[in-house]
């Protein structure tokens, strides 16, 4: 008997209010511990697919089942609570620039209702993992692009989510910084968490050695298993 | 249990911090609400002050029947008998014209009045205590007795009490209406203050929502802020009112002593201060909750 997938999309389509069809008939499963790389050009529907997976959006047709819960049937507050199981890194980062690095990473723990001392301990551990502990009192605007992206990763992993949803993590980063981010994501994946990320960078997809899902104009164009690791 | 308490403590701390971060703005907002609170408070206290007046003056409704000069002793006796037979009359007291003259002379301090050979101009009279507080009974006794033989004129002495009573009813109604309107104003001020704060914290609200914050979670710090602001405003309003009472108190007390009323300044008890502050806190929280709710509805559409 196989365990239920962590995320299951069954014939999912998504249409926004302007009636534009962004995703068509997507069927996809993500298991615990998977590393899935969603590839595709800009506008292919990668970000929308990630938003559907973490219950930020609801499908227009079909079903998205996350940790056994059909997101179409969830109330707004239940969907929000479900999102706490994920660590999300947004393409536009969504950092709070009027809060310190420490306070930014604290936010998911505040939402989850952690006790302050335990939360502070976890924040420092997360910042240490991404190499930003020395900058805990800095404001995000004083950080470089790579550091801001690492800060986003710290915020995503601080509450030990069951999966990381990462949207274009290396966009606007040079090769060296992009490599650092990839290493961090792989390290997190090796700890047993699922990682789903989107990218338009084929080289990054290859480097991650995950299961590749290719989107073209909102439809699933290819689905490849990860290459064997030498 | 602690997982439930921590978000509340955190939201409360956040609200305190925001209040203290902008002390001038906080004070001005509190002052605006406090002035709004003072108006119905002043009306309420004034009405209650006046409500005391009739009771303190021990005025019971009474009518005075003045007999005609030419009324005979038999007519006077008949009037007295008919008065005593009435169910709505509690007591009847006869004041003869000689006694009335003596009383008058004593009051105005003119003893010669009694020695004067001139005819006594005062009539015989009956002072009648009407049973019960019903103003209609007073009117009925006055109207019916005025038509009796030998009666010249009937005066209803408690008429002013009725008028005051009617004014107090109007005053009470106005107090309730004004309190309702102005307390809605407190909620509106809070709504607007929080709306401005929301605009400053849009990014935070969006990120919180995306990372799993429910509407309750997002609303909480704003609601605490609204409640604290309301509480501060309520206390300020009550203190302003007490200060105004202390300033105007001596003059009002001097007036009140003439009517035997209690001191003006003591009219706002600490319980009422607590009530006003709590009401303002609740209204502040309500205004804040409505403001956040409206914002969340807009961003979700």
Image (cartoon, rainbow, N blue to C red):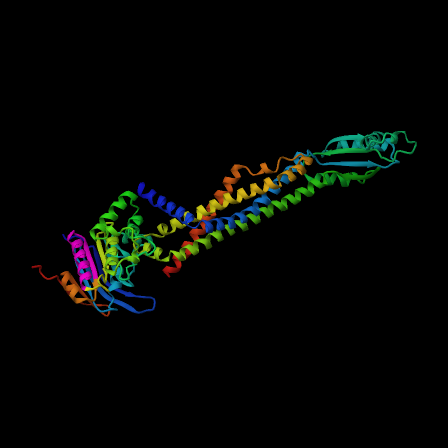
The quarter holding residue A156 reads: bottom left
Could you tell me which quadrant the N terminus of chain B lies in? Answer: top left
Indicate whether residue A191 is drawn in magenta.
Answer: yes
As rendered, which of A178 and A169 lies closer to the eye?
A178
Is residue A17 found left or right of A26 in the rendered image?
right
Up/down of B146 relative to A200, above or below:
above
Q: Position of residue B233 (x, y in %)?
A: 49, 46
Q: Position of residue B181 (x, y in %)?
A: 54, 51
Q: Residue furthest left?
A: A230
* Residues rendered magenta in the picture: A175-197
State how many labels appear.
0
- Residue at coordinates 23% horizontally, 66% vertically from top-left? A25
Q: Residue furthest right?
A: B117
The quarter holding residue B118 reads: top right
The quarter holding residue A225 reads: bottom left
Q: Position of residue A92 (x, y in %)?
A: 28, 62
Residue A160 visible in rendering:
no
As rendered, which of A60 and B143 lies closer to the eye?
A60
Is residue B136 found left or right of B109 in the rendered image?
left
Is residue B229 found left or right of A210 in the rendered image?
right
Could you tell me which quadrant the C terminus of chain B lies in? Answer: bottom left
Up/down of A90 relative to B273, above or below:
below
- Residue at coordinates 76% horizontally, 41% vertically from top-left? B143
Up/down of A103 relative to A209, above or below:
above
Indicate whether residue A226 is drawn in magenta.
Answer: no
Residue B152 visible in rendering:
yes
Q: Magenta: predominant secondary structure element?
A: helix
As rendered, which of B109 and A55 lies closer to the eye?
B109
């Amino acid at each position: 008997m196989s365990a239920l997938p962590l995320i299951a999309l069954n014939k999912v389509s998504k249409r926004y209010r302007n009636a534009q069809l962004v995703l068509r008939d997507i069927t996809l499963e993500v298991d615990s511990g998977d590393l899935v790389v969603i590839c595709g050009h800009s506008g292919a529907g990668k970000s929308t697919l990630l938003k559907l997976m973490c219950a930020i959006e609801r499908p227009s047709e079909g079903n998205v089942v996350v940790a056994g819960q059909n997101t179409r049937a969830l109330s707004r507050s239940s969907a929000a609570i479900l999102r706490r199981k994920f660590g999300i890194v947004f393409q536009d980062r969504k950092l709070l620039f009027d809060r310190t690095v420490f306070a930014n990473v604290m936010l998911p723990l505040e939402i989850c209702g952690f006790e302050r001392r335990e939360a502070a301990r976890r924040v420092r551990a997360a910042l240490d993992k991404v190499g930003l502990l020395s900058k805990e009192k800095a404001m995000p605007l004083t950080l470089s692009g790579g550091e801001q992206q690492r800060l986003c990763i710290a915020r995503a992993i601080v509450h030990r989510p069951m999966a990381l949803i990462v949207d274009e993590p290396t966009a606007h980063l040079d090769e060296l910084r992009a490599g650092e981010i990839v290493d961090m994501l792989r390290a997190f994946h090796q700890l047993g968490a699922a990682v789903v990320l989107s990218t338009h960078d084929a080289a990054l997809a290859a480097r991650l050695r995950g299961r590749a899902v290719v989107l073209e104009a909102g439809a699933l164009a290819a689905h490849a298993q990860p290459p064997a690791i030498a | 249990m602690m997982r439930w308490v921590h978000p509340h403590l955190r939201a409360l701390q956040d609200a305190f911090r925001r209040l203290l971060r902008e002390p001038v703005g906080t004070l001005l907002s509190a002052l605006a609400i406090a002035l709004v609170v003072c108006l119905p408070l002043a009306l309420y206290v004034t009405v209650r002050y006046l409500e005391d007046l009739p009771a303190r003056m021990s005025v019971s409704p009474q009518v005075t029947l003045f007999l005609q000069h030419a009324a005979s002793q038999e007519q006077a006796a008949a009037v007295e008998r008919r008065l005593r037979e009435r169910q709505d009359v509690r007591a009847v007291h006869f004041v003869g014209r000689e006694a009335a003259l003596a009383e008058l002379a004593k009051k105005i301090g003119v003893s010669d009045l009694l020695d004067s050979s001139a005819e006594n101009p005062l009539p015989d009279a009956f002072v009648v205590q009407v049973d019960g507080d019903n103003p209609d009974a007073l009117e009925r006794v006055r109207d019916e007795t005025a038509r009796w033989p030998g009666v010249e004129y009937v005066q209803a002495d408690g008429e002013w009490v009725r008028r005051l009573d009617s004014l107090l009813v109007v005053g009470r109604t106005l107090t309730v209406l004004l309190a309702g309107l102005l307390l809605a104003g407190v909620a509106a001020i809070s709504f607007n203050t929080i709306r401005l704060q929301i605009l400053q914290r849009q990014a935070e609200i969006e990120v919180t929502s995306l990372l799993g914050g429910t509407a309750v979670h997002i609303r909480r710090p704003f609601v605490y802020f609204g409640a604290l602001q309301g509480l501060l405003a309520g206390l300020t309003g009550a203190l302003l009112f007490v200060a105004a009472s202390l300033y105007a108190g001596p003059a009002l007390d001097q007036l009140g002593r003439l009517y035997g009323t209690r001191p003006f300044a003591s009219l706002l008890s600490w319980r009422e201060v607590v009530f006003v502050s709590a009401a303002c806190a609740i209204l502040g929280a309500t205004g804040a909750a409505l403001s956040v709710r409206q914002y969340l509805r807009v961003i979700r559409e």
